[in-house]
Image: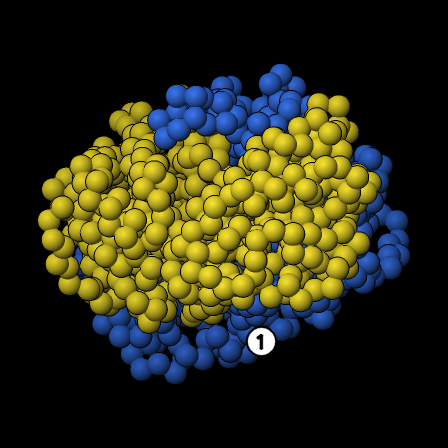
Chain colours: A yellow, B blue
């Protein structure tokens, strides 16, 4: 990798360039944007070894973990290129004029999704590739045709600049307009960015406090803009009596592996586990967690925040430390607390606070009805998991969890979020600020789009996706019927 | 129509009932909800004469206008019933497990849209049927499976209660759960409603100040909720030189008719008209407006607000009164001001304020470039219209307008919003607070839904729309391919 010397851009310059680029991106062809996305993926893959080494130095994440994350990142860019070329994401609908429409003659109406305009992407600390400079939000925005200004995360500044340099080069060499992408740095730039009048949408992955502060700024603007914040989740796991009897070791090992993966620094880390009181689950989980390894965290600030978040557990009567330690260390040890369901239901808000690191709470319950009460006490979640067996009469719990979470899992673990068409990474507040949307999967493009309808507009003035000849071959709903 | 004696519900009671009903609605079958929607439509049609007479008394709108609005309202309820039965609105996506998925083996993931939960609908003054108690928002929420608490508009209280009584009866007789619908009244109830912790989403149609106040409350909640406010629009119309030469009388008549329809009390009323300086347009428009009739407004408060909104025009140097009057009257006269494009571009914010009533501003321009400058000065709009001719080289203007507005019209008039699949009634702020969404057309259901993904979940625990056998026959995207 060549040495990166890159001038930090001011927010004003970045946004001025983005505003200039916006109409050019909006007018670009799907094949153009697909080419840009693939060019970025190719550049990153071509420099993988150096990027992974740099990421490992800055984040303390392991090389295999980072290698997998880069694979995911470039796969995602290429998958979005396919989605753009296919065109279904445009949601094109054509209603031909109809003099006999029952409410009165209707005009010719044609609707499609179009890019919102300049977008801000606030990078995350814990996915230095997949939720950072060239991560899912950037891929989705470029796919949509929205210029992106990324606010780098301070935990991996050199990697951010190196990836940005690759994105710059890839976009320039593949013919993207100047201003389609920019990187800005620093907390003050982040604040300035969300307040910039030219900004039309922002996405954020990070802490509840940081995300809420930016959401409040976005909402209080003279012209509010959509803000898609993914803020926090404890990702509860519910183990039925039958599952605890049938597969106790497997569940204990699976839980310990998921909660300690990446030193517990995943938004989908399972942070609370409900197990039958009269089962062998608790000692088995404790054993599995004790056998897991900790490690250095992403940054000193994140480590300090992690330990501070344990205080309420350490101080709460009725909650006991079962494994690990709340004593500060440079390399936190996997840590588990335990309590009973009565204590839990008396203090659900406090005991459901997120601990961003390798800690979890085991809650021992008696009857299946306790699980329903526990599910009702949940705030919004990214995920909720049931470990069950075929005979379990668990429909009511699954239904309750689907009301609380964006993704419901059966006999799996919430970490390792696959990028697919059906994936949903979102949920009611505080999981996200915008429950309609997702930040993972192909439907995440929708965050950067808004519908526009054209009434009785001549063919030549319509966007190609809405013209009679359908030159891009976009799937469309025509007079209420889907056309492939 | 029987006399309506109806206890006003407290917000707390209404929301408690809605929260109880929410899981029952979420679990209801499409055929159930379609039946409820049709039952409401049938009840309203069955009492049409009495309802129209009551509406005319309270709103001062004409009987033909109200009759057409009721047709639209019951059509909309029935169209949504069809949409629910068809099931495409669920956005069902199935990705089967795939060990060879390029980023790593993927699990079975199945996604669909599910109801958000209890919804608040703030009724509008100007559509006592179509955007009020049993209007589009209520229809969309019930279609989605979300219980609705409607905040009645104070301008037609008796009609609100009469319609609510019909909705109550229709829902009860067609088997809907108690709590699926409620009506509350009064400003304080409106405030309490948006702050209720059980509420998950709110929709609003009304003034910029009222909508912004509710949006701010919704955003500042401990758990913010989506708020879909439709707040204001001036719906600019751009007449090209060629159109002004070819069809001056037709355009003048069309504009006057659209701006004075319903005494100018439409959110899509065209409030500013750009015409060539060197054309006959201005005197023709003035003549057509002078030939139009005014009338009583919806309420005294709305009339007072209308006159107050004219003050900046009346006081602005370079703006002249061309027809009508800014002098207060119980039955405002259609009124037109005129100015030149230089004055307009010097004060666009002030001259683009909405006047909710029969007033508009004519702006005289010289070159087509003036139209581009004027378009760039616009804030977000519900609609933007071009009156042009086939030879016009107008692509850049149309493209600019598509960035500013939710609907772009060619040689039409923005009032009279058809309810169809492709309709879009929304736009960037201040047209709406949520540019991704629409409040008219079948896609308006999306405001009351959020995606949920199920991972590796046994068939029996999945919602029917995601089961292998697809018992409801829902269109689905399976492994990236659409199935009808």
Residue depicted at 32% across the width and 42% down the height = A63
Where A105 falls versus B233 (above or below)? above
Q: In the image, A42: left or right of B32?
A: left
Q: In the image, B237: left or right of B39?
A: left
User: B458 or B86, which lies in front?
Assistant: B458
Q: Quadrant of the C terminus of chain A?
A: top left
User: B81 or B3, which lies in front?
Assistant: B81
Where B340 falls versus A167 (above or below)? below
Q: Quadrant of residue B10?
A: bottom right
Q: In the image, A16: left or right of B129?
A: left
Where A37 falls versus B477 (above or below)? below
User: B390 or B293, which lies in front?
Assistant: B390
> From this viewpoint, is residue B420 visible?
no
> From this viewpoint, is residue A271 visible?
yes
The image position of residue B69, as x and y in percent, is 62, 47
Residue that extends furthest to the top in the rendered view of this protein = B469
Residue depicted at 14% across the width and 55% down the height = A4
Residue depicted at 50% across the width and 27% down the height = B107
The image position of residue A459, as x and y in percent, is 29, 34
The image position of residue A480, as x and y in percent, is 50, 27
| Number of dots carrying numbers | 1
For the residue carrying disc 1, how many other residues have a C-alpha within 10 Å: few (<14), some (14-19), or many (20+)? some
Chain of the residue that carries numbered disc 1 in the rendered image: B
The image position of residue B357, as x and y in percent, is 52, 66
Residue depicted at 74% across the width and 64% down the height = A317
Q: Quadrant of residue A278?
A: top right
Can you identify the residue that label 1 sits on? B304
């Amino acid at each position: 990798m060549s040495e990166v010397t890159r001038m930090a851009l001011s927010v004003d310059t970045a946004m001025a360039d983005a505003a200039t680029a916006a109409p050019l991106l909006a007018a670009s062809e799907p094949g153009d944007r697909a080419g840009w996305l693939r060019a970025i993926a190719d550049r990153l893959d071509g420099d993988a070894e150096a990027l992974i080494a740099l990421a490992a130095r800055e984040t303390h994440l392991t090389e295999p973990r980072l290698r997998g994350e880069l694979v995911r990142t470039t796969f995602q860019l290429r998958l979005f290129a396919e989605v753009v070329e296919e065109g279904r994401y445009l949601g094109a609908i054509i209603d031909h004029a109809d003099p006999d429409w029952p409410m009165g003659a209707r005009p010719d109406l044609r609707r499609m999704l179009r890019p919102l305009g300049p977008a801000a992407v606030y990078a995350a600390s814990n996915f230095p590739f997949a939720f950072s400079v060239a991560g899912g939000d950037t891929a989705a925005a470029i796919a949509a045709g929205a210029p992106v200004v990324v606010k780098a995360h301070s935990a991996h500044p050199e990697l951010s600049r190196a990836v940005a340099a690759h994105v710059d080069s890839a976009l320039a060499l593949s013919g993207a307009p100047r201003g389609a992408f920019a990187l800005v740095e620093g907390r003050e730039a982040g604040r300035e960015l969300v307040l910039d009048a030219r900004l039309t949408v922002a996405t954020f992955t990070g802490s509840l406090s940081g995300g809420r502060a930016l959401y409040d700024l976005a909402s209080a603007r003279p012209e509010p803009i959509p803000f898609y914040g993914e803020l926090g989740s404890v990702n509860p796991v519910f183990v039925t009596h039958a599952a605890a009897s049938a597969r106790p070791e497997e569940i204990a090992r699976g839980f310990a592996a998921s909660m300690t993966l990446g030193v517990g620094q995943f938004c989908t880390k399972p942070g609370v586990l409900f197990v039958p009181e009269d089962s062998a689950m608790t000692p088995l989980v404790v054993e599995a967690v004790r056998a897991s390894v900790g490690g250095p965290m992403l940054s000193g600030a994140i480590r300090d925040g992690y330990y501070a978040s344990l205080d309420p557990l350490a101080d709460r009567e009725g909650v006991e430390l079962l494994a690990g330690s709340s004593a500060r260390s440079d390399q936190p040890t996997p840590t588990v607390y335990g309590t009973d369901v009565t204590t839990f239901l008396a203090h659900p808000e406090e005991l459901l606070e997120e601990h961003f690191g390798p800690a979890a709470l085991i809650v021992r319950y008696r009857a299946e009805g306790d699980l329903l009460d526990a599910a009702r006490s949940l705030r919004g979640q990214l995920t909720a998991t049931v470990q069950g067996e075929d005979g379990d009469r668990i429909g009511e719990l699954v239904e309750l969890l689907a009301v609380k979470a964006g993704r419901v899992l059966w006999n799996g673990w919430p970490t390792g979020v696959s990028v697919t068409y059906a994936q949903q990474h979102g949920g009611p507040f505080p999981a996200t600020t915008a429950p309609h949307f997702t930040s993972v999967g192909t439907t995440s493009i929708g965050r950067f789009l808004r519908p526009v309808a054209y009434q009785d507009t001549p063919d030549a003035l319509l966007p190609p996706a809405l013209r009679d000849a359908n030159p891009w071959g976009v799937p469309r709903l025509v007079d209420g019927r889907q056309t492939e």
